[in-house]
Amino acid sequence: MLAFAAAVVFIIAFIINATETSTEAVFGPMSLLLVGLALLALHVAGVGAGWSARRR
């Protein structure tokens, strides 16, 4: 799930960068890139992986 969120953030950052839209510093392409990388790191670490099998 976090990987999909990271992909969406990367797409938004690419569109902002490609169209050279002037935005605030918080929503700049570099800050969105860093948020996307953080989401990918959380995904690889196993956070938000979904339901796990219950042990009996």
Image (cartoon, grey):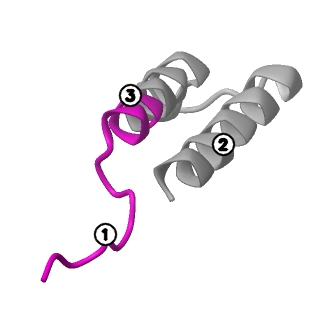
Q: Which of marks 2 and 3 is nearer the N terminus?
A: 2
Dot 2 alpha-carbon crowd within 10 angstroms: few under 14, some 14 to 19, many 20 or more: some
Q: Residue 19, position in %: x, y?
A: 87, 27
Contact? badges 2 and 3 (CB < 8 Å)? no
Magenta span: chief secondary structure: loop
Magenta highlight on residue 49: yes
Q: Position of residue 30 (x, y in %)?
A: 53, 16
Determine the image quadrant of residue 34: top left
Q: Mark 3 points at which residue?
A: 41
> Which residue is located at x 76 percent, y 28 percent?
14
Q: Determine the residue positioned at 47% across, 33% down.
A: 40
Closer to the camera: disc 2 or disc 1?
1
Q: Name the residue: 74% across, 39% down.
A: 11
Side (left or right) of 7 relative to 54: right
Image-based side of 31 in relation to 11, left or right: left
Q: Which residue is drawn at 39% across and 57% down?
A: 49
Which label belongs to residue 7?
Answer: 2
Residue type of the residue flagged with mark 3: Ala
Judging depth in this view, the residue of 51 and 39 nearest the camera is 51
Gap between marks 2 and 3, in whole Å?
Answer: 13 Å
Between marks 2 and 1, how big is the CA–CA gap?
23 Å
Give the residues in magenta. Answer: 40-56
6 to the left or right of 40: right
Residue 6: percent from left, percent from top: 56, 42
Label of residue 40 in the image = none
Upstream in sequence: badge 2 or badge 1: 2
Q: Is residue 24 left or right of residue 21?
A: left
